[in-house]
Image: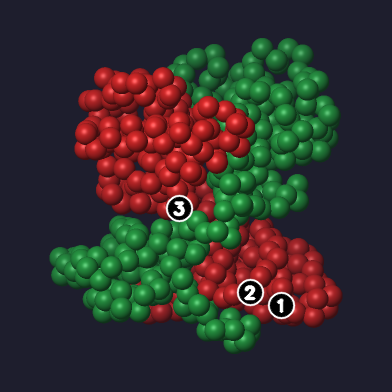
Chain colours: A green, B red
Amino acid sequence: MERSVFFISDGTAITAEVVGHAVLSQFPVSTTSYTLPFVESEARAIAVSEQINALYKQSGARPLVFYSIVSPVVRAIVENSAGFCQDVVQALVAPLQQELGLAPDPVAHRTHGLTATNLTKYDARIAAIDYTLAHDDGISLRNLDQAQIILLGVSRCGKTPTSIYLAMQYGIRAANYPFIADDMDNLRLPAALKPYHDKLFGLTIDPERLAAIRDERLNNSQYASLRQCRLEINEVQSLFRNHQIPFLNSTNHSVEEMATKIMDLLGLNRRMY
Amino acid sequence: MERSVFFISDGTAITAEVVGHAVLSQFPVSTTSYTLPFVESEARAIAVSEQINALYKQSGARPLVFYSIVSPVVRAIVENSAGFCQDVVQALVAPLQQELGLAPDPVAHRTHGLTATNLTKYDARIAAIDYTLAHDDGISLRNLDQAQIILLGVSRCGKTPTSIYLAMQYGIRAANYPFIADDMDNLRLPAALKPYHDKLFGLTIDPERLAAIRDERLNNSQYASLRQCRLEINEVQSLFRNHQIPFLNSTNHSVEEMATKIMDLLGLNRRMY
């Protein structure tokens, strides 16, 4: 049976979404999701509660509600809806309180909000995004000494999304450099990159998946042909091996997996929260 | 007392980080964090457990461990470390099992991994990132019919990070358009944007914060002067009001808050997971 799922919070509801998805991923159930952030007032909580109750009545299946709300009054309104309500954080607060010997002091917006305490880290994250965009796709090879990582790979193997994820989520200054078809006759590591060997990280991808991705962009082109994709991937992998550049295959991995794996392999620290 | 905190998972550890940070944000405790993703083998779990135990011995304070691991054998090794171990997902699984009348079937990498089921949504997210980068900062005013949102604002008010966050996290095709100093004498809504009034969303920012951000980029410039920032913000806010374009002030909000608030106000659906 199809279930409605609500992710509700007085903040962004990102925590409720992440936890809810992680829990739901363990069950073979198909769902329709509604995310309701910034439920901060009683009036909005009442409207939310009515929405949950109406969906229950209409579908006959009890909606699942993953929530995190600091105000006891607003929270109680949501909890008193007809949904199956689960606080996504509370279950871990009590044991931690005992371990730390400290009383919890919940404040709304602390997790994904901007405060005096996290402003410096936040500004560094925004600066990392600026840097990463300015050094996307080999646009600029200046200031590479400021890069924390330089991703290498052929066109459409996942360099840009991975770089941006690293910058956005973890405040990493990630440059990336593309090898293009014209490079393939005599593929070399550009001289501008050689001083930064410790920062170089290669991406590769299965030629079949690459051809499919490129075909979406340039249908039936030489660029998207399996033959061309095989050639480029082979050349680039040889270069990675010859220069002892670590590399990963992106075919079966999300940007989240690529980014966290690369940070783990290179031992990079997160700049976040 | 300073506490060490570990976020451990057989996948990206993003869920463990998000939950752990949300719980910890309720306590006045200062922490040093270690994220250990892809703990999939017994060998790595043993190494992790030894790292936790060594830190305990060295600091005298029991490390806090937020984890999510599917394999019972690997999980048990981490749970048997000397850390204060909290499974970030398990507490919600049992009640959900009862409500759904289904047995959980935990699979590693399901939350942030790439699978046959989520590949289409994933590709749409990547396409949204491509679109957003191609339509950043007014680079292209073509294909705006494909945009789901068009952010407007002065230079350095947060348009680019917000656009990229919308694309990366939620698969939203977000264009953005800058108003520059030369526009200010006679500020108008560009003709190319007028057909898309329903997609327009304005960003504004306090002049003092804007001046500080611009000064980081161009120290002591006219561009960064408080007078210039005030002028631009005033003109742009008038334009938003005259054209009935909804807008938000980014001064005290993170990109996470801006993005989720804008999606909520415009009623945009997430394309994720």
Evaluate whether residue A217 shows in this view. Answer: yes
Q: Is residue B119 above or below residue B181?
A: below
- Mark on residue B252? 3
Q: Is residue B191 above or below residue A150?
A: above
Q: Chain of mark 3?
A: B
- Mark on residue B144? none
Please check whether the numbered discs 3 and 2 fall on a single chain.
Answer: yes
Q: Residue at x 39, y 27 (%)?
A: B179
Circle count: 3
- The amino acid type of the residue labelled 3 equals Asn
Q: CA distance from mark 3 to mark 1?
A: 30 Å
- Mark on residue B29? 2
Find disc 1 in the rendering and name its residue: B1
Residue B48, horizontal then vertical, whole percent:
76, 67
Q: SS of the residue at dot 3?
A: loop
| 3 or 2: tag closer to the N-terminus | 2
